Amino acid sequence: MFKIAVLVSGGGTNLQCIIDAINNGYLKNCSIEAVISDRIGVYSLERAVSNDIKVYVIDKKTHKGKISDEILKLLQDKVDLIVCAGWLSILEGDLIPEFKNKIINIHPSLIPAFCGEGMYGIKVHESAIKYGVKVSGCTVHFVDNGTDTGPIIIQKTVPVYSEDTPDVLQKRILEQEHMVLPEAIKLISEEKIRVEGRKVIIK
């Protein structure tokens, strides 16, 4: 069994798409062993509990710079992949080398555009529209010591229309996120990914 932990900070629609992909058989021989939130009371936790998944809260207000250390204590030698699904805290410290090329994140832009420190949620789409881009999209990438700087696994594009609001663009991209995140997990779980420097080779 390929064991997954999912890190969340909000409503959990990306978590739900992983749960659905396991339940409908798209993700074979995969299980979510833990859902970890950096905030108390988010809806992601309810989604996990309703699917009999263990939940943990490592509150960023309490743990501050020690969140990654606490995650490592919980997950070391227990899971094969950590998935950041709407996770807002920065991962750092020993967690990164211990899970080298075993942590992935989904970001709502075409990295390296509109990413990095402070670029999350609706801010990403506001920036894309303000800049006047004609396409945007989402990126699944490995997590390294930077912010949104790890090797890119998959990217999907969507058009950006002149009448788009940030909310409208966000919804259009979120639809792609819900398809591409399970796709990336499937490729990794089936050992169809090879990392060579910054290049991710899909077999």
Image (tube, rainbow, N blue to C red):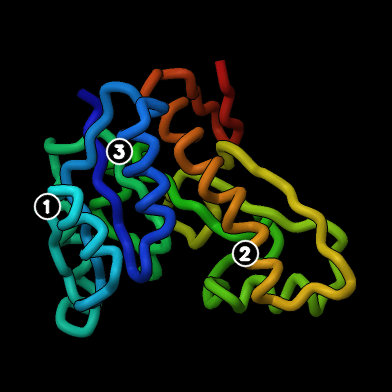
In the image, residue 143 sits, relative to residue 168, either above or below, namely above
Q: In x, y percent, where is residue 67?
A: 21, 67
Which disc, if any, is residue 54?
1
In the image, residue 140 sits, relative to residue 56, either above or below, namely above
Q: For marks 3 and 1, give the CA distance.
A: 16 Å
Q: Closer to the camera: disc 1 or disc 2?
A: 2
First in sequence, mark 3 or 1: give its number. 1
Residue at (37% x, 43% y) in the render:
18
- Residue lying furthest top in this view? 203
Disc 2 marks which residue? 171
Q: For marks 1 and 2, give the CA distance.
A: 29 Å
Q: Secondary structure at mark 2?
A: helix
First in sequence, mark 1 or 2: give its number. 1
Q: Secondary structure at mark 3?
A: strand
Q: Residues within 10 Å of mark 1 (few under 14, many from 20)?
A: some
Q: In x, y percent, where is residue 20?
A: 37, 41
Q: Closer to the camera: disc 2 or disc 3?
A: 2
Residue at (59% x, 76% y) in the render:
122
Q: Amino acid at mark 3?
A: Leu
Disc 3 marks which residue? 81
